[in-house]
Image: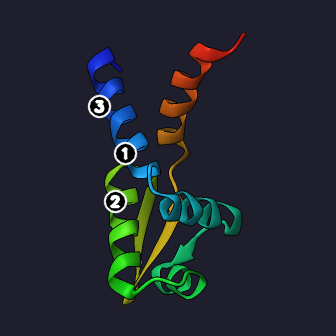
Amino acid sequence: MDARLKLERLEAVCAALAHASRRQILLTVHIRGGMTAGDVAARFHHAWPTISRHLRVLEEAGLLEAERRGRERFYTVDHAMLDVLREWMSWFEK
């Protein structure tokens, strides 16, 4: 992957993770091994449009993958995009 693409992906990941609710959603989906949008909404005290927007931001950043299961969307964490952040953080290791 070229440097420019890595930087664009890093920017998208960091922007998505800038909001505390999105970080918590990502962590919850990861710990549970995947969740439907309805399950996510049931765990957080936000209006449905807010949850939907957070899920969309995480998906657009490549942090979540969505799979259609009938009328529902099932979300799982895309660990490859976390590798972009992990690689950048490695610059700060001693």
Q: Which residue is mark 1?
A: 15
Q: Which residue is mark 2?
A: 57
Q: Position of residue 82 (x, y in %)?
A: 53, 40
> Closer to us: mark 2 or mark 1?
1
Q: Position of residue 79 (x, y in %)?
A: 55, 45
Say whether marks 2 and 1 touch (CB < 8 Å).
yes
- Residues at marks 3 and 1, CA–CA distance in whole angstroms: 11 Å
Label 3: how many residues lie within 10 Å, few (<14), some (14-19) or many (20+)? few
Q: Give SS at disc 2.
A: helix
Q: Amino acid at mark 1?
A: Ala
Query: Tag on residue 8?
Result: 3
- Residues at marks 3 and 2, CA–CA distance in whole angstroms: 15 Å
Q: Amino acid at mark 3?
A: Glu
Q: Quadrant of the C terminus?
A: top right
Q: Look at the picture and state if 69 lies above or below 64.
A: below
Q: Nearer the viewer, residue 3 or 44?
A: 44
